[in-house]
Amino acid sequence: MFLKDQSVDHRKIGKKLKLFIFSDKVGTGLPLWLPRGAIFRKNLENFLTNIQEKSGYEMVVTPHIGSKTLYVQSGHWSKYGKDNFKSISTPRKGEEFMLKSMNCPHHCEVYRSQEWSYRDLPKRFAEFGTVYRYEQSGELHGLTRVRCFTQDDAHIFCTKDQLLEEFKKVIDLVFYVFRSLGFMKYTIRISLRDPKKDYIGSEKNWEQAEKAILKVVEKEKIKASINYGEAAFYGPKLDFLIKDSLERNWQLGTIQIDYNLPERFDLYYKGKNNEKCRPVMIHRAPFGSLERLIAIMIEHTKGDFPLWLAPNQAVILPISEKYIVYAKKILNLMQNCDIRVFIDERNEKINKKIRDSENNKIPFMIILGKKEENNEMISLRRHGVGNIGTFTISKGIEIIFQEKEIKIKLKS
């Protein structure tokens, strides 16, 4: 999207804050994450991993490539193969691999790896899976459109009786993620098939999936528009569009119901009478793409990230080198409290250190001089606010620690 105010462009802010870069030698549309950017990504991953583990998800890891036959079976080859990265040949004749463009076929094979009973379901497999898609060079734009991105992907395999409840739980999770990230305005769209387009699967499967989404939306009294022709090629979906601080709409979360891939991969579980039953598959990704989410967050916050997400939460600014030993004591105490902090040991005047910390949007600055060392205190500054006072070490740590905690609760 075109930005009238170039000062909030995530590419400029990302470079200034040393979050990510692009290199022509590495390849167009392939981001390189710098240390601060890697921390930011990891913070988002840890945030969602923690929620998922509490909600009964199990983390899996799948390869970045897969046999071409896997994607032929899933239908991704016929749908996207020609427009994606070409297949990878090997020294073995007739053997072909593809860069992974979707995680779902791999998760189907994870499910197939053992037998399940109805008592075992639902199974919820989650992964931060990196995928590769050959976007045209004219469509690439910073982190919002890249050729390599990481999805917060999960696939839920459940019985038909569990479908509506599982779908509702995912909706609650998406809402929680939005609130935690500061996106309070959003719209919801039901994406159904267009009868004129080609989709995989039977009419019966599509009718069941579409009715299920409409039923959940009606039961939960969710306001949603209906968009025909925007369904995934294997099933209908519920899309979530957030509105950022610049009043732009972005699609983030998506939830999809799929009766078709379980058929294609012959997935089943044993029912109450030991009969073979076909599970229903829910695809879901609250973030959508980590790269795109981070771009949106950079522009939404102008780089002033919530404390719990900030790569560096605090910087210790000794007035001179005489106070480095005291600074290291404070550093150790704060690191023991899981505060991401470092010492600015440069031989610069304190005003320049403060100014640089403000420009780098570091949330807390800890000023240390003779008064602070003699009294075992610390002086705190808050980015964008200024001095907030002088405190005992324990009280200063408490102020920072309390702000970095997420106060929002996920519905049980």
Image (cartoon, helix red, strand yellow):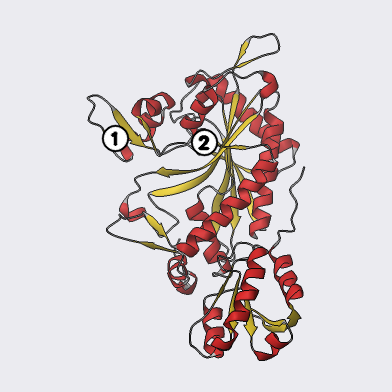
The disc labelled 1 sits on which kind of residue? Ser
Is residue 223 visible to the viewer in this orientation of the structure?
Answer: no
Q: For the point 42% across and 37% down, which residue is it?
A: 63
Mark number displayed over residue 87: 1
Horizontal side of 140 relative to 304 (left or right) equals: left
Q: Is residue 41 above or below residue 131?
A: below
Task: Give the x, y percent position of residue 177.
Answer: 65, 51
The disc labelled 2 sits on which kind of residue? Ala
Residue 386 sits in which quadrant?
Answer: bottom right
Q: For the point 53% across and 65% down, which residue is it?
A: 298
Q: Foreground: 121 or 371? A: 371
Q: Foreground: 138 or 91? A: 91
Q: For the point 75% across and 36% down, which residue is it?
A: 219
Task: Give the x, y percent position of residue 67.
Answer: 36, 29
Q: Residue tagged by mark 2?
A: 231
Labels 2 and 1 touching (C-beta < 8 A): no
Q: Is residue 217 above or below residue 234?
A: below
Q: For the point 73% across and 76% down, which residue is it?
A: 393
Task: Give the x, y percent position of residue 197.
Answer: 44, 31
Is residue 56 visible to the viewer in this orientation of the structure?
Answer: yes
